[in-house]
Image (cartoon, grey):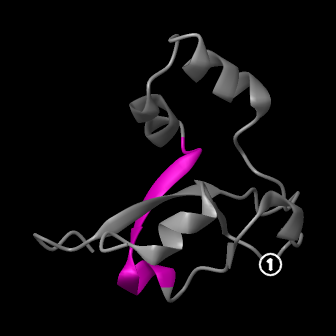
Amino acid sequence: ASDGGRVCRPLIVVDETTGRLKMKQKHLDALKNKEWEFEDFLKRGYVEYLDVNEENDAYIALHEKDLTAGAHTHCEIEPFTLLGVCA
């Protein structure tokens, strides 16, 4: 949903078939080298913003090592973001 004022947070997209992150080290290197911006991750489908309603239908891993093939849909960028905007 895109209701005005609804809090959304970015999550890394997990590949359904492999159960691994779609984003790879080469993509992070491109960001580090200023070849990419965060917006590029969104445009290419490596990161998605989910709101609270969408999170109800997502299976989100806290860490990459926790990913399960065929189960997880997303992974936290940084676990402390679970605390939300008030933390």
Q: Amino acid at mark 1?
A: Ala
Residue 57 pos. (x, y %): 54, 86
In the displayed structure image, the side of residue 76 where residue 47 appears, left or right: left
In the displayed structure image, the side of residue 85 where residue 13 appears, left or right: right
Magenta residues span 45-55
Residue 38 pos. (x, y %): 44, 33
Q: Residue furthest left?
A: 4
Frontmost residue, 79 versus 46: 79
Point 88% across, 73% down: residue: 68
Quadrant of the snapshot with the C terminus: bottom left
Quadrant of the snapshot with the N terminus: bottom left
Q: Is residue 48 magenta?
A: yes
Q: Quadrant of residue 2?
A: bottom left
Q: Residue furthest front?
A: 87
Q: Is residue 14 magenta?
A: no
In the displayed structure image, the side of residue 57 where residue 24 appears, left or right: right
Point 68% across, 20% down: residue: 29
Residue 74 pos. (x, y %): 64, 65
Q: Residue tagged by mark 1? A: 71
Frontmost residue, 84 versus 8: 84
Is 30 situated above or below 25? above
